[in-house]
Amino acid sequence: MPIKIPDLLPAVDVLGSENIFVMTETRAAHQDVRPLKLLLLNLMPKKIETENQLIRMLSNTPLQVGIELLRIDNHESKNTPRQHLDSFYRDFDEVKDSNYDGLIITGAPLGLVQFEDISYWEKIQTIIRWSQDHVTSTLFLCWAAQAALNVLYDLPKQTRDKKLSGVYKHRVLNPHEPLTRGFDDEFLVPHSRNADFPVNFICNHTDLNMLASSEDAGGYLFASSCRRQVFVTGHPEYDAETLSQEYWRDQDAGISPIIPESYFPSDDPENTPTNVWRSHANLLFTNWLNYYVYQITPYQLDKES
């Protein structure tokens, strides 16, 4: 089944050129099925790029999925045209009285900023708490995972001594968990963060189930027993060249970034990287939609408690 998105969203053409089956809202309106209703809170600077990456992941499922885009505020964006934001994004006041099958909150370039210094921190707190009563299952990516640990478990911000950047090996800790069904025993995931997620710290201070981790990157995938909160500390949705773009962006800005680990062939930034995590990423999002959303969401969302 296809993923349902607004008719004029750039992803229609981008994913269509990749032979990914997307369905416009106009066409979907003529089908007598209830698509899963997903909300995407996009905090990344390059919003169109992030839309394409996540919609690409969500499209690889037999379920029909409808996507709504949410912004945290209506401030000007340096990387996304105002017309795009006004055309496709909704404000929280427009959705707060609705219920959703799933919510994805993306990462954000805020790893070195204290929570209380973030201009929209109160709004983030409000949305995370709102999701507990209005969303069947929420997926927190990278920085959003750290934010949710603070809001839901009162955990302090953990910061690494140096930025974690590269592609790292992970191990499945519970092969019988539906969220990791089909995963290889070891799999690769890109990370790009200053946040730290020590396995023992999370396990000792929360009731979350640690499902996958890495010796180098720490806790990667953990979830609540009720399946309503899922934490992903990496960026499985990244394209092959996303880490490269971040590296050269920082290089041009004079930041002198470290070369992402195990990413560029021969560790040479002039070489073109390849995507070695795509199969894991597709399985993760497919399993989340199937086992954590579709299997437990009510048919009538207005009956969600």
Image (spheres, helix red, strand yellow):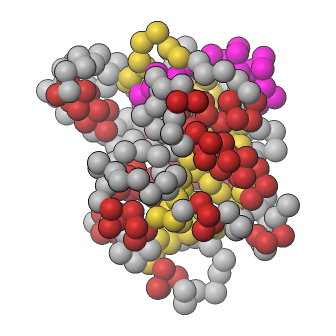
In magenta stretch: residue 195? yes
Residue positioned most to the left = 270
Query: Which of the 4 image quadrants contains residue 227?
Result: top right
Query: Which of the 4 image quadrants contains residue 221?
Result: top right
In magenta stretch: residue 135? no
**Residue shown at 33%/62% (left/top)?**
82
Which quadrant is home to the C terminus? bottom right
Give the x, y percent position of residue 13.
30, 69
Which quadrant is home to the N terminus? bottom right
Residue 28 in view, yes or no: yes
In the drawing, does residue 181 fall left or right of residue 300?
left
Give the x, y percent position of residue 59.
49, 61
Query: Which of the 4 image quadrants contains residue 32?
Result: bottom right
Residue 170 in view, yes or no: no
**Count of marks placed on residues:** 0
Residue positioned most to the bottom = 30
Seen in the picture, residue 141 relative to 305 is either above or below; the reply is above
**Residue shown at 61%/34% (left/top)?**
147
**Residue shown at 65%/50% (left/top)?**
127
In the drawing, does residue 28 fall left or right of residue 154?
left
In the drawing, does residue 25 fall left or right of residue 251?
right
Give the x, y percent position of residue 185.
58, 28
Q: Which residues are magenta?
A: 190-209
Q: Which of the pair 174/27 is nearer the observer?
A: 27
**Residue shown at 47%/71% (left/top)?**
5
Q: Which of the pair 32/146 is nearer the observer?
A: 146
Give the x, y percent position of residue 92.
59, 60
